[in-house]
Image: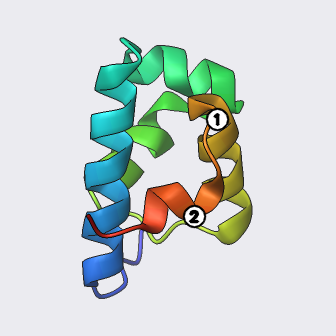
Amino acid sequence: MKRTHKGPLRDTLAKNMRRLRAERGLSQEALAHEAGMNRTYLSAVERAERNVSIDNIDRIAKGLDVEPWILLRDR
């Protein structure tokens, strides 16, 4: 699998995903189910290893019950 250069926005997305998932008491598997995604893919996104599409950011946000921009906000 070809990997693209890891940028800071990927780290922000990953950090926010982990924080929000933990706050909601969700496992990666449970979030993957809520988002309608594969757990392995979701795990790679959460480790900032995948360059995620805007459509998948929306699916993850829905799984976490937040607006998509929340996942990209640098706190």
Q: Nearer the viewer, residue 9 or 51?
A: 9
Which of pointers 1 and 2 lies earlier in the amino acid sequence?
1
- Indicate whether 58 appears above or below 4: above
Residue occupying the point 53% across, 66% down: 52
Q: Nearer the viewer, residue 12 or 48?
A: 12
Residue type at mark 2 is Trp
> Which quarter shows the N terminus?
bottom left
Q: Residues within 10 Å of mark 1 (few under 14, many from 20)?
A: some
Q: Position of residue 38 (x, y in %)?
A: 58, 33
Q: Kindly identify which residue carries mark 1.
A: 37
Callout 1: helix, strand or loop?
Answer: loop
Callout 2: helix, strand or loop?
Answer: helix
Residue 49 in view in this figure: no
Judged from this view, the residue extending furthest toward the front is: 75
- 58 sits left or right of 25 in the view: right
Q: Kindly identify which residue carries mark 2.
A: 69
Q: Position of residue 72 (x, y in %)?
A: 45, 67
Residue type at mark 1 is Met
Using the rendered view, name the quadrant where residue 7 is placed.
Answer: bottom left
Residue occupying the point 70% across, 54% down: 58
Q: Which mark is residue 47?
A: none
